[in-house]
Amino acid sequence: MAYDYPYIRDEVRINAYVQAFYDQFVGNGPVYLLGRRVSHEAGFNLRVGSRPIIIIADIYDGAGQMIDASGAYPSGNGGTVTVRCRRSINAQINVSGATGANGYAGANGSEAVPEDAIEGHYITVMDPGTGEEREEWVPREVISPAIPEVPPARGGSGGAGGNAGTLVFTSLEECWPSLAAEGGAGGAGGPGGSLGDIQAEEGSFGANGNASAIDYSIVSEQDYLNLIKSDLGIYANYWAPFRIASGIYFYHRYNSRIANRSGYLPMAVTEFVAALQFQPDNRDAVRYYNQLVGAGANAAPEAANLGGGGNNALGLPRNMDLLPRFDYYFDAYTSFGALALAFLNNGTQWLLGAEGYAAMVGFASQQKLQMLAARDNSADELNIAKAEQKDAEGDITYAQQRVDSIIREIQTARPVMPPNSFTIGGLIGSIASIAGAVASIAAAIPSGGASLVALVPSLVALEESLSKNAEPIVNSFLDGAKVNDKELDEVKKSYEKVGKNVDSLVKGGKTIVSFVKLVQSMNASAASMPDSSKYVALVKQGTELVHALLVARNRAVLAQQRVDAAASRLARADDVVASVETLVENLRQKKHTIKDIGLAAIDIAASKAQALQTIAFRAQRSVEIYTLQDQEENVLLDAGMISPDIGRAYSEEEIGEAALAKELMTSWGGILNPVNMKLAYISFFDARPDWDTYRRSFTEGPELRSLRSSFRFNFPIDTSDLPATHFDTKVKNILVAFVGAKSGSSEISCIVRHGAKYEQRRHEGDPTIQLLTPQFVNRRAKTERLDRPVTNLDSPLDAPTSLSIWGRGVGGDWEIAIEQHEIDSGSLDLSQVTEIQVWIDYQFVR
């Protein structure tokens, strides 16, 4: 097989196949080996001849082996090797010239040999005519001439050594490679001939070949990028898409709960960054990078002005909110999983050699129908994502209005707040100064603050200048998260997962503010000043609403990223539909092979795997929301995927159908993991949950005044408000009464809203806070006091379809607002309301 394209893998293993790739390369120019990691197979040296080779890798590992580009004996010149790497290990490269051939041996000498001759003389002869005798002269006759002495010959001269080739080695750090570019030694002269005791001289040595200067350099990141772009030329457009495919694969492989998968996230980021370095406008790379790290982060990676980010490979937020209907999702998963596996099996059988074009046409037509259905699924998912995006944007408006309102209340109340001291963080100040701090933080977030909620939901980073001249009590707020603080450690861990360094955030003059610590500090200090409790509550509410606005903004960015991911999946589905349509037509014309049919079936099965993983993730979130037990290890988002290395190796015939089928079966084996979630869900109910009702009554006070003036009111519920022996408290139902209200009927429609922070106390001690989507539920408020028998007639625990707020923590920020149509009816009269009652039924374990 002849090759005329770069050899590209995530991990290039220099072995016999790579040697054949080099030896049989027919393209113009050098041979390229491109990989995130390039290493030698044990015991394998790469032999480089006259064709140059260029290796570009993040890591080049010689593994004790060599790139041997030395000249061929005798007198061959060395080859040309270029290695560009960020880091190397045990690199050994030789481009030295070959040794010259030895000279020939000189001929031996010989002794002189005298002439052998018969001297002239007379002989007697008889005249045949007369019969007389006479003397006749015979001239001298030489039998063998004399041979003079031949001296022994000098030995022949040795051949010239080969010249060294060209060796370029570039890295970003010192790595001490072993590099050789010496000229070949001249060949030895031949031995002289001999004659008796006489020995002729040896021949002279051949000239040494020329050594070459090794171009070994340690360069900056930017210089490195410029060099490899120059080396690659058009091949950058080969490598960038492959690196994106590798990044997507690593992204799907990542699982923080599985040891051998926890390192894949920074690897995915590395691939997306590398692709963007070659193709900065590549929309896929930008989308995946922003989806993973945060919107805008690719433009200024250390700015930490992150919005969104932290999504999983499906484009869904890791803390995605939904109604925790586990059985519903699990049943759908198991039903469709069997169909997808059957489809995969058919494709694998075709790949391994089934026959019959008529059958293949039918199967390909079935593929088209399946892919059309998958495309429709993607379109539905996009529409859902757009609807959720609209809701998220509306939530920002709502949250901003509440922040604006509470800040106005705080500013209005500041002049009349009591001047007595308030202790927080070891410093003493007034409640008015604390109120001013909250107001300044609220104002700073849009302009001088960076949201970190994508990484740690309670944190925000403020410019140092915002707190530089603040009074001590304000700075005590901003001193709540030092570099070694637990929450900041969480930020560090999150940054490290995506291969980034948080030090620039801290050293760059930013201050970390923890909203959780602000509220905790106020709670701890409020007991010492009961006369100011209403002002403390006002400031505390302001703090929590600012945080809610921050969370809402991040949720809107996540929603946009989900829309982008869904749109991308729809586009890919359209592409597959088009390819299958072409496949069907070509099959009818018998232009395609059985292999093409099998590969198409496998691609479609993989697209089905994405849909299955989305269902499995929803089941995962259902269990996590309800049981508070992490289930990430039970949903493998790469099930049904194969490494781009395997796909490319198969297309280049480095591996065959059997090896590919084995990889596919191994990958699809992960589709069985969600069964473990079923066991976790079932075992949770072994605790035999009970239920109770939390009853809240508001008479004269801010809540009642707010209801009369604005038709809505807010109230918080802290986990400490519930009995200390009730753990894992989850909402089951809500009842409301506006006692004394008048309307056209004995009921008033209202909307009950739970904010984004859901709290519940666990047996382990500290309350658990889940940041989820704010939920709304419509309730018909009574105009008389609530009264009912103590019964539990709500939906069973495993069928929570009647209430969107079901299964979540009771604690958090609540709001009740009268429906606008009730207000517009003209019959609503709240002037005589004497009490607001709110009853919340909840489940708990003891």
Image (spheres, rainbow, N blue to C red):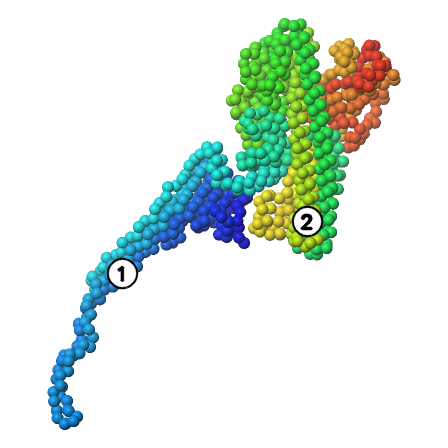
* Element under disc 2: helix
Residue 703, x across and y down, in percent: 75, 13
Among numbered discs 1 and 2, the one appearing first in the sequence: 1
Decide which of 37, 160 is in the foreground and name it.
160
Quarter of the image for residue 807 reads top right
Q: Which residue is mark 2?
A: 583
Find residue 569 and report its image quarter. Answer: top right
In the figure, residue 674 lies in which quadrant? top right
Residue 359's spot in the image, x, y percent? 72, 54
Secondary structure beneath disc 1?
Answer: loop
Q: Provide the residue designation for mark 1.
A: 106
Residue 846: give x, y in percent of width and height.
73, 25
Name the residue at 83% across, 27% down.
Answer: 793
- Residue type at mark 2 is Leu
Figure check: 26 above or below 747: below
Image quarter in which the N terminus is found: bottom right
